[in-house]
Image (cartoon, grey):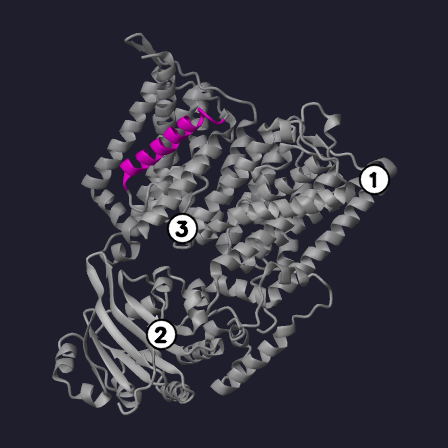
Amino acid sequence: MTTPFIAFCLSFLALFLFYVILTLALNLQWGQAGILNFGLVGFVALGAYITAICMLDPSTLEYIDVGFGLPFPIAFVIAIIVTGIIAWLVSAIVRLGLEELAIITLAFAEVVHIAISNETWLTGGTTGIYISSFLDEKLGLLGYNVVFTVVLLVAALLVYYFTTKLNFSQFGRISNAIRQDEIKAKSLGINTVSHRMKVFVIGSMIMAAAGSLYAYFGLRVVPELYPVGLTFAVWIALILGGSGNNRGAVLGIGIYMLMDMLARLYLDIPGHPEIAAGLKFVIIGLLLVILIIRRPEGILGPKRSRYA
Amino acid sequence: MTSQVWSIINSFLLETFILFILAAGFFLVHRTAKFLNIAHGDYATLGAYLVWTFVSVLGWNIWIAMVISIIAMGFIAIGIDQVTYKYLRGAPLALLLCSIGVGLVVRYGIFMAWGARFKKIAFALPNIEIFGTVISGSLILTLAFGGFVILLAYYLLKYTGLGTSVRAVADNSLLAESFGIDTEKTLKFVWFLSGSSAALGGVVLALYRPLTFEMGFMWILLIIAVSILAGTKIKFPLLLGACGIIAGGTELGLFFIPEAYRLGIGFVILVIAILIRRVVEK
Amino acid sequence: MHNKAKIILQCENLKKSFGATRAVDGCSLEFQEGTITSIIGPNGSGKTTLFNIITGFTPPDSGKVYYKDKDITKLCMKSKSYALADLGIAQSFQLARGFGEMAILESLMVPPTIADDNSLFTVFQLLLPGRKETSRLEREKKAREMLKELGLEEKSAEKLQDQDVGTQKLVELGQIFLLGPSIFLLDEPLAGVSRDKVPILLNHIKGLREMGKTIVMIEHKMEPVLNISDMIYVLVKGKILVNGSPDEIRNDQRVKEAYLGVSSVRTE
């Protein structure tokens, strides 16, 4: 049990928790309110980059013109609020049909990706921004990873608690009602568009928070960390575990990452790196297909309410 | 014609027709089976890689390779449908998610089989010169293929029995069934056309870029956009028009916005078009 | 009519076409407070479309709607159904709509009340530990009372989608009631309901009238219509053929003609 190995395990755990938070946020939008959001990674990236830009001291990097040199907690809050505002503007689209929602959110994430890759004066382009964290200087490898993981664990628990409580509250009841029958909900005096906009914003702010935390502890933001594939990975995890289900979401991520790890460890055929990388996704794809066909509700089944 | 103007027209025509050929099969499936087949771009990629294999590994003539690949992809598309989508008929969301899975399998299957390094299909076409402007052979071939697709679509839909069934199923599949139309057979036909046109699209892409495992997938966003833009009926001219709007709008936008945001411009056009359509429909 | 009760809802010359079809072709109706009005007519005569206009699910092409002496036409034009429900106009649907996956008790807890505050600020307050939702117990109590009223107590934990049509329609009635509306627009409340449940529903509807609520029903079952209505409108091909008391309608020759040869009148 060497230190680097423990540190590696911890960072893996941290990644797991990061994904859990994202899945919980997506479950809030999809499982509770039936909002199809394929732009998840865009909001994560926004949270991460806004944090990085806020924290950056512009004099340290010559190719970036903007930076505010703020400490992390303030940057974190700003990132969440600004992303919330952007999400609010985008959320007007919830009144559109599922297909249109899917592609517009997908395109949104793409545009964010393009922007962060190109606006070098703001985001450092493809080089990205390095975040200097005082924790990094103070703690050793192991200590740093412990703090990283603990903070993410606390965050994940908070998000889990919050989204579950929301689900069983009147707010969540309305979300579920809108998902099941929007016309009926409207006839009962519920402003369905406004409600779904709120859900969209809340979910996006959680995604931004996750992005912000992970960027801070990961010490850098770079476009390649936020590919479209991340959105689909979370979606797959949500379905693997049973959409609409918070516990299922956690299970789904677990399965997804387990397979990722197994693929990395056992499928490494020397001389053919493609096999490992490719096979992992092929298996995930197959799993998704099989699951959708056999059990659309996923592994754990549909959510049970406290009243049923 | 000044070379700058020609270069813009060239880009516009290219983008429109490449997008059209790629989107045609997707559009057909979207209108009949009523879902967004995210794997469509990957079908195109597979078609291109098959041609590469036939030409570079088996040494076949390129044109024969293309024909075989196109036919093969048609059957592969049917096969995939029989194994997966068939069980999800009428559930658009499940189909969408399933197609994400299928796309992953095809895309990374290609990655595993053919590796990550770029491949190039040796495809030299003669250029033509008219009034001092050089028109590349690739452009002519692309336009020819595009024209072929739209004429074929027109002929099939209007003058053949299967084509009529396709239109009926697109309109209302339950009603079509009650009239005795074999929807399963019709869908098989649709998938054959979809797969083969995807392969054609892949081949066209290969004229201009080296092959990568993601080459088709990269287009899926635009493909979905034009298909949604093209309205609710099966009208291929509308699809071509939608491609033209996106391509034209993008070319226009590129005067003001850097090249990197090409996709973003297309997206803005899509949003505006959707909003306009909503207002008009009221 | 002896005493002219207040007119709570009034439609003036409403028109709505779908393409070439004139679904509603210049209808003017008025509904008196505290009465049961039935709208009858052959299939396809525009009854449901009329309802949908009033409740904001289908914008009219022209015409006006007045509710409690206020002109609400703009709300109908903009399809603001939730705002209309808020004002007190409630609707039930031909094919019972509800939140199928929810337990019956929970689906009765959905209708919003004035005390509701779903602003983002309140939502974030849920983060604070120990913060119980103050209104939930109240809401649950009301829902249980309604269940008792409807005679469905034992089914409180069952899902709505597993119920028979009669129960579903009862629940729907309960849901609407909890909204506290002044006027109930019921689209075929008895359709698909088993024989034994029909009287239960009818009793509840009559009970609503006793409470001073206004009911407007679309129905095909003629006997209940003739028995409990105060006023009947007959709609044929988007136009009002005639209106009057049950006795007047029962004996009206034009009504008999309109029904004969178009669709059979179910007199059960």
Q: Residues within 10 Å of mark 1 (few under 14, many from 20)?
A: few
- Can you identify the residue that label 2 sits on? C69
Kindly identify which chain the residue marked by label 2 belongs to: C
- Asked whether residue A93 appears in the rendered view, the answer is yes
- Can you identify the residue that label 1 sits on? A135
The span shown in magenta is B235-257
Q: How crowded is mark 2: few (under 14 residues within 10 Å), some or many (20 or more)?
A: few
Give the mark toward the camera: 2 or 3: 2
Task: Give the answer, above or below, for where B264 lies relative to A160.
Answer: above
Q: Do the residues labelled 1 and 2 touch (CB within 8 Å)?
A: no
Q: In this orientation, which residue lies closer to the viewer: B193 or C28?
A: C28
Q: Position of residue A284 (x, y in %)?
A: 57, 44
Question: Magenta segment: does it hold C99?
Answer: no
Kindly identify which chain the residue marked by label 3 belongs to: B
- What quarter of the picture does the N terminus of chain B occupy? top left
The verdict on a common chain for dots 2 and 3 is no
- Can you identify the residue that label 3 sits on? B86
The verdict on a common chain for dots 3 and 1 is no
| Disc 2, SS | loop
| Disc 3, SS | helix
Question: Magenta segment: does it hold B243?
Answer: yes
